[in-house]
């Protein structure tokens, strides 16, 4: 996870406040439009022949959704509708969690269900639904190659690999894998990912980011321009982010320590088993491995 400088100039987009400040308001929708178009342009490059999604305008929608048959709810970071009725869920996911994919699919169901026409003739026609996940973690289990960080997922026929249904799309960006430097930035996609990953570390606007949209972004991201209320909310959001990061780091450290301890125990048992097989007495084996004579007797 990215470290923050002692004296930051620009807002951290991985905080709830920072992400919604930059991308979650009507005032800054040009930033979100530019980001989405950069992402979809990259997706089009990875899937030649597939129609390219272009976002021309957006309308922000309420971010809290209630399940139709219960109290389960979803709260999106950003939820928008395009000019042709397509829906966009945009999420900044700060940390890995159990059943992340399940959660992502569950969230995408809300924009689908709400398209149903009640009390009217309806032929089940649906508009496109896009879920864009900006992930501050890497999918577990080495699911993807270390250099592969942009993933576009659709319903596919597993036999002949054609896209079975193209109106439900998930795009995930594994941000820790993005490693381009300022000198390597060429496309708007590169530039946006560089900004998302490095904004809170920057003290000046990089020379490579000269497009007008980045002028707007750096103006909005500058902490010195915040109102007193914005500064207070940002500090609270930043504290929550730091607490989460520290909790994750502690869990990872405990996991490594437990893993090393388990490895030592396994090695001791294996060595004891070998020595016992060679005829060494239990007292000697216990002195070498640290196991009790009772444990050795059970081997």
Image (tube, grey):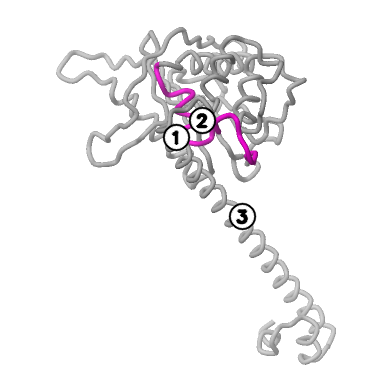
Please state which of the two labelled residues, at mark 1 or mark 2, is closer to the viewer.
2
How would you rate the neighbour count of disc 1 (Cα within 10 Å): few for under 14, some for 14-19, many for 20 or more?
some
How would you rate the neighbour count of disc 2 (Cα within 10 Å): few for under 14, some for 14-19, many for 20 or more?
some
Q: Which residues are magenta?
A: 3-26
Q: Toward the viewer: 37 or 259? A: 37
Q: Secondary structure at mark 3?
A: helix
Q: Is residue 182 above or below residue 49?
A: below
Query: Is the C-beta separation of discs 2 and 3 under 8 Å?
Result: no
Query: Is the C-beta separation of discs 3 and 1 under 8 Å?
Result: no
Q: Earlier in the sequence, mark 3 or mark 1?
A: 1
Q: Quadrant of residue 253?
A: bottom right
User: Which residue is tagged 2?
Assistant: 133
Q: Is residue 21 left or right of residue 112?
A: right
Residue 67 on the magenta span: no
Q: Toward the viewer: 151 or 209? A: 209
Q: Quadrant of residue 281?
A: bottom right
Query: Is the C-beta separation of discs 1 and 2 under 8 Å?
Result: yes
Q: Toward the viewer: 18 or 289? A: 18
- Real-space CA distance between mark 2 and mark 3, rounded to the nearest whole angstrom: 23 Å
- Asked if one can make out residue 251 in the rendered structure from this viewpoint, the answer is yes
Residue 22 on the magenta span: yes
Res. 104 mark: 1
Principal secondary structure, stretch drawn in magenta: loop
Q: Earlier in the sequence, mark 1 or mark 2?
A: 1
User: Which residue is tagged 3?
Assistant: 252
Q: Is residue 56 left or right of residue 199?
A: left
Percent position of residue 156, x then y: 51, 25
- Asked if one can make out residue 153 in the rendered structure from this viewpoint, the answer is no
Q: Secondary structure at mark 2?
A: strand
């Amino acid at each position: 996870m990215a470290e923050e400088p002692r004296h930051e100039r620009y807002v951290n987009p991985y905080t709830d406040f920072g992400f919604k400040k930059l991308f979650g308001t009507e005032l800054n929708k040009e930033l979100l439009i530019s980001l989405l178009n950069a992402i979809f342009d990259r997706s089009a490059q990875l899937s030649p022949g597939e129609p390219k999604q272009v976002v021309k305008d957006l309308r922000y929608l309420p971010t809290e959704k209630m399940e139709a048959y219960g109290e389960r709810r979803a709260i999106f970071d950003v939820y928008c509708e395009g000019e042709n009725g397509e829906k966009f869920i945009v999420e900044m996911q700060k940390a890995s969690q159990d059943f992340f994919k399940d959660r992502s699919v569950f969230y995408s169901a809300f924009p689908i269900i709400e398209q149903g026409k009640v009390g009217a003739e309806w032929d089940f026609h649906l508009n496109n639904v896009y879920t864009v996940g900006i992930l501050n973690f890497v999918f577990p289990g080495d699911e993807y190659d270390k250099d592969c960080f942009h993933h576009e997922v659709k319903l596919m026929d597993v036999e002949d690999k054609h896209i079975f249904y193209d109106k439900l799309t998930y795009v995930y960006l594994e941000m820790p894998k993005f490693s381009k430097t300022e000198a390597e930035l060429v496309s708007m996609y590169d530039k946006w990912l560089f900004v998302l990953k490095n904004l809170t570390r920057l003290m000046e606007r990089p020379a490579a980011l000269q497009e007008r949209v980045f002028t707007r972004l750096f103006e909005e991201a500058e902490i010195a321009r915040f109102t007193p209320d914005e500064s207070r909310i940002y500090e609270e959001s930043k504290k929550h982010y730091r607490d989460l990061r520290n909790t994750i780091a502690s869990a990872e450290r405990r996991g490594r320590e437990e893993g090393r301890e388990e490895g030592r125990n396994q090695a001791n048992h294996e060595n004891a088993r070998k020595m016992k097989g060679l005829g060494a007495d239990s007292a000697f084996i216990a002195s070498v491995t640290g196991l009790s004579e009772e444990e050795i007797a059970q081997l």
